[in-house]
Amino acid sequence: MPFRVAIAGAGPAGLYAAILLKRTWPDIEVHVTEQNPPDATFGFGVVSSDQALGFLREDDPETANLIEPHMERWSDIAVVHRDERIAIDGVGFAAIGRLQLLQLLQQRARELAVEPRYNTHLEDAPQPGDADLVIGADGLNSVVRAAAPDDFGARMDMLSNRFIWFGATCEFEALTQTFIDTGLGAFNAHHYRYASGMSTFIVETRDAIWRKAGFEGLSEDQTRATCERLFAGTLGGAKLISNNSHWRQFPNLRCERFFAGNRVLVGDALHTAHFSIGSGTRLALEDVIALVKALREHALNLETALPAWQAARQPVLDKIVAAALRSARWYEAFDRHMALEPWPFALEYIRRAGRLDADRLRKMAPAFTLGLERRGIEL
Ligand SMILES: Cc1cc2nc3c(=O)[nH]c(=O)nc-3n(C[C@H](O)[C@H](O)[C@H](O)COP(=O)(O)OP(=O)(O)OC[C@H]3O[C@@H](n4cnc5c(N)ncnc54)[C@H](O)[C@@H]3O)c2cc1C
């Protein structure tokens, strides 16, 4: 009897797990169940640092070759504060529409004879007896995790800021962080192009400002129109597009154990990393790469492969998740940081995740550091 794998969820993690498993063991049975139709998605584009895509090329050149031609790339981050635009050079980003990414992964899965079962909501986790290995790739509200949260040691707390994910009908030149002080209070937009004529536009504000502004009582379209008005100067006549866009608070999710019996969690089902460091999709794909590597090295023996997977993956994950948390905390107080002048503000912004000392910053962003030094700002 072939080894059987049941995968809950056909987001980036679930599809990629199916692809890597079938690529490694063409004879195993892989069943993927997804609640949505294949062309549904939340959100617009997703971004990742350029280097972060290196892992995909190393491990799976076929999938990298399929995805990379569809990515928008640029090399600066721009920070706009008090209407001054400051470019921070040398970071390197690549972005792609979430739906396009999913469709490319669906195509690759099909080539490997995996056809997910779409439009099928799992009320409960696949039972341990349903498969030799159960992969919970079913995102933040994972039923696989919810069936046994204590087995995974799951903990979740919410950040307080409110954010909402829109598209915009224009192409921003670079990944841009725009901070504005409005009559309602301070707002931030994370915006970047991800396809021809389209950008992601995420609006964020403090919870108290969100309440004071009366967003709670607005419809989806009124919310979109209000955000469009607040950021009219940034949008320059472009429209915001809503795709089931609602204000949310970002959840910090951690699990002490990545597996319980023959069930594992990957991607957003296992952990979250604040979107301001653009890593959630990459982490989801990397979880899968590490899992399949451990399964290969242990010849599909789960008893040894799963602890080896967690031991190898956890230190890397902890580092990125900690950086994401530091970045998220900076955003939680971004209105207070806005008391700084634009250049010191931009310096504080780029250092918010705590990973850039003066030497690294000089190497990474020579033009930006020169601009700081010319203004007598110490690194
Ligand atoms: C505002 C915002 C901006 C972001 N920006 C970025 C970014 O720029 N770059 C980046 O890398 N990441 C970004 N992310 C994070 C990224 O979207 C996630 O980390 C990534 O999608 C995780 O992939 P996943 O496959 O683990 O989970 P998901 O993408 O959530 O996929 C889970 C899948 O499981 C399905 N599912 C769930 N429950 C069930 C069920 N009961 N039955 C059947 N199917 C089910 C869902 O329909 C879904 O298709 C952002 C997130 C947010 C909120």
Image (cartoon, helix red, strand yellow):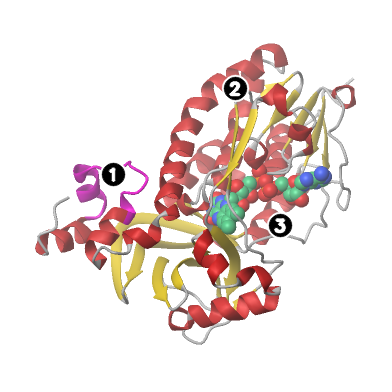
Report helix, strand or loop for mark 3.
helix
Q: Earlier in the sequence, mark 2 or mark 3?
A: 3
Distance from the alpha carbon under mark 2 to that under mark 1: 29 Å
The crowd level at tag 2 (other Cα within 10 Å; few <14, some 14-19, many 20+) is: many
x, y percent for residue 160: 53, 52
- Asked whether, in this view, residue 129 is left or right of residue 14, the answer is right
Q: Is mark 3 within 8 Å of ligand 1?
A: no
x, y percent for residue 379: 17, 50
Report helix, strand or loop for mark 1.
loop
Q: Is residue 250 visible?
A: yes
Q: Which residue is mark 3?
A: 103
- Asked whether, in this view, residue 108 is left or right of residue 6, the answer is left
Q: Is residue 350 on the magenta stretch?
A: yes
328 lies above or below 71: above
Q: Which residue is mark 2?
A: 309
Q: Residue at x 35, y 54 (%)?
A: 91
The foreground one among 37 and 58 is 37
Q: Which residue is mark 1?
A: 356
Q: What segment is highlighted magenta in the picture? A: 349-365
- Asked whether, in this view, residue 251 is left or right of residue 184, the answer is right
Q: Is mark 2 within 8 Å of ligand 1?
A: no
x, y percent for residue 103: 71, 57
Q: Earlier in the sequence, mark 2 or mark 1?
A: 2
Report helix, strand or loop for mark 2.
helix
Q: Residue at x 75, y 18 (%)?
A: 261
